Image: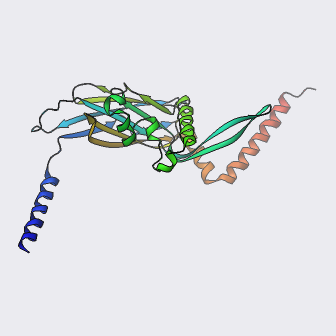
Amino acid sequence: MKAALRSLLGALALAAFGAQAPRAETLIASVSSHQIQINSNYTGAQITVFGLVERDGRTVARGDPYDIVVTVRGPQRMLIVREKEQVGPIWINRTQRRFPEHSSFLTVSSNRPLKEIIGEEGARRDRVGLANAQRSATPALEMEGSTARFRDALIRILKEKGLYAQDERGVTFLSQTLFSAPIEVPATAPTGTYEIEVVLYAGGAILARHTTNFEVIKTGIEQRLAQGAHDRSLLYGLATVILALLLGWLASVIFRRD
């Protein structure tokens, strides 16, 4: 009984020591703006992620340099990829794959190539990078070659639209511990909340992680029209039809040939 009690007290002491032990590195990060407003002349925006690595003064300096990976994920959407096949003289959609709860916007920035930071196996394990971030958590789906083919097509299409991007030199160390990373948000980026995940690496191991966010919203008349279409869909539809008929009649009157 006394031996069991001593073991229990020893375990509690170790747990308390572990809970109070300071971390060697602490990552502090923020963003230049937590809100991007879309108005009539909006053509895109740029925000900057900046941060600082704080070290415990009692920690011995590491032999490996610090590495930073910044991942920005946009609102989750149901994304569908369709494959066209030629049947005779026409092209039709024959097969498709659905990707539920996938990021509609995704950028990955690092201070050097990911393969030099954590390697391919580590990137797959941590789901870092454009391809790995879209891998399904269900192993059975990843075993299907067709799913991988459609996922690669999804990444290619969104990269062409400017919604997916990977910049292996997108993070700049201003000093040994201070860094910044500009993030381009194109005009086609959807509205909603965007999550920014900043991860600190050294020697291929994760030392610290910090998460923040920003949002893209509509303002002015664009916001009022979008809100009206959502809240009063019937009236909005009738007003659109009436306006189209009125413009059509007006055009016929102006360009009518006598």
Residue at x 28%, y 29% (from the top left corner): 179
For the image, the number of numbered tags is 0
Residue placed most toward the observer, 118 or 56: 118
- 222 left or right of 137 in image: right
Using the rendered view, name the quadrant where residue 87 is placed.
top right
Residue 141 horizontal/vertical position (percent): 52, 48
Q: Residue at x 51, y 45 (%)?
A: 143
x and y percentages locating residue 3 in the rendered image: 7, 70
Question: In the rendered image, is residue 110 in sight?
Answer: no
Give the side of residue 135 with respect to residue 40, left or right: left
Image position, residue 188 (x, y; %): 55, 34
Quadrant showing the C terminus: top right
> Residue 254 vs residue 50: left or right?
right
Q: Nearer the viewer, residue 232 or 56?
A: 56
State the image coordinates of residue 196 (x, y, percent, origin top left). 38, 40
Residue closest to the eye, 148 or 24: 148
Identified at 36% across, 40% down, the residue is 197
Quick check: 176 above or below 54? above
- Residue at point 8%, 75% (across, down): 1
When asked about the image quadrant of residue 175, the answer is top left
Front in this rendered view, residue 227 or 143? 143
